[in-house]
Amino acid sequence: MNLQQLRYVFEIARRGYNVSEAAEALFTSQPGVSKQIKLLEEELGVDIFVRHGKRLTGITEPGRHVLTIAERVLRDVDNLKQVGAEFSREASGRLGIATTHTQARYALPPVVRKFVDRYPGVQLSLHQGNPAQCCEYVLSGEADIAIATEAIAEIADLVMLPCYQWNRVVVAPPGHPILAEKPLTLEAIARFPVITYDFAFTGRSQINKAFLARGLKPNVTLTAIDSDVIKTYVSLGLGIGIIAGMAFDPAQDRKLGMADASHLFESSTTRIGIRKNAYLRGYTYAFIELFAPHLKRKVVDAALAGIGSDPGL
């Protein structure tokens, strides 16, 4: 038994039991992967994968236990490498951030600027996706931390740290009747075509929840994955937009008017998600604190260890 065999098991499961894709991802040959899996199964005395002819179609019950242990061992090996890198090359390395468009476009730029100035030897990479995809980036090891609003709280293998709360605004072309509504109400919004986020993104559930509680059904005519697209179509007169407050910039969005809608919707909380039992480099703690100053290193460590109180906001 060796680590490479465990990597093969993990990657095959991750690739939907496609051995060719797993071999390509690991820069090796399909026959070599298949041979090593058979050798591991023979050593353990159990079948790890379900087969249909020569194809792998699923994972057996003992295979599920093997996969769980393999994933834990590979994470521990990665942590050992991080320990070595931390003390041999303290100010260099890589940091992967998985986040949504809204965070990447509006919340992260000043943080990234400060981080790059402080750690010029660290290669920073941003992986964009919806909140669920961001979590998968971290769980698979492609990213170190996830920053998102939805989904992180639902992933058992991630430690969740609250960063800040935010709410929404309504945007419309200047002179639109919705901007004259005082006070702004859900009933008024429901009278117009609405353009807002896709269901998987940026607090959309809070929007749906608010209308449902009032027995209203908004006329959502278009959804998009980022705020800039929403604002573009609003400026074309296709509807009014409901977007995150941080995404409206009076200097940049001069073709739009804005009405605060924070009294209509529950606040959403942006969170950082970190894989449980992860070993974090020193610069990762620094990035987290730059993004959320209340998340000091000792707070993050306590959360990773499963001790301490909720850091709160």
Image (tube, grey):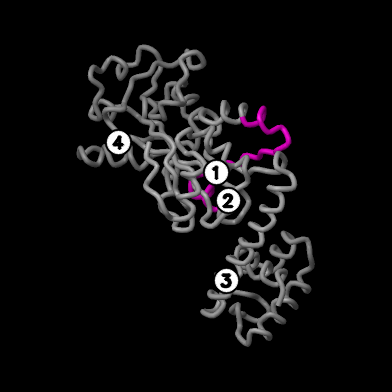
* Label 2 environment density (alpha carbons within 10 Å; few <14, some 14–19, many ≥20): many
Residue 125 is one of the magenta-drawn residues: yes
Query: Whole-Å distance between the Cαs marked 3 and 4?
Result: 40 Å
Q: Percent from the top left, x then y, of residue 220?
A: 36, 35
Q: Which mark is residue 69?
A: 3
Q: Is residue 252 above or below residue 81?
A: above
Q: Is residue 4 above or below residue 164?
A: below
Pick whichever of labels 2 and 4 is earlier in the sequence. 2
Disc 3 is placed on an element classified as helix
Question: Which stretch appears magenta?
Answer: 115-136
Which residue does the image show at 47% across and 19% down from the upper left? 249
Mark 2, residue position: 137
Q: Is residue 228 above or below residue 41?
A: above
- Marks 4,1: beta carbons within 8 A: no
Pick whichever of labels 4 and 1 is earlier in the sequence. 1
Query: Whole-Å distance between the Cαs marked 4 and 1?
Result: 24 Å
- Marks 2,1: beta carbons within 8 A: yes
Q: Percent from the top left, x then y, of residue 30?
A: 76, 70
Which residue does the image show at 41% across and 34% down from the upper left? 164
Mark 4, residue position: 266
Mark 1, residue position: 129
Badge nearest the viewer, 3 or 2 = 3
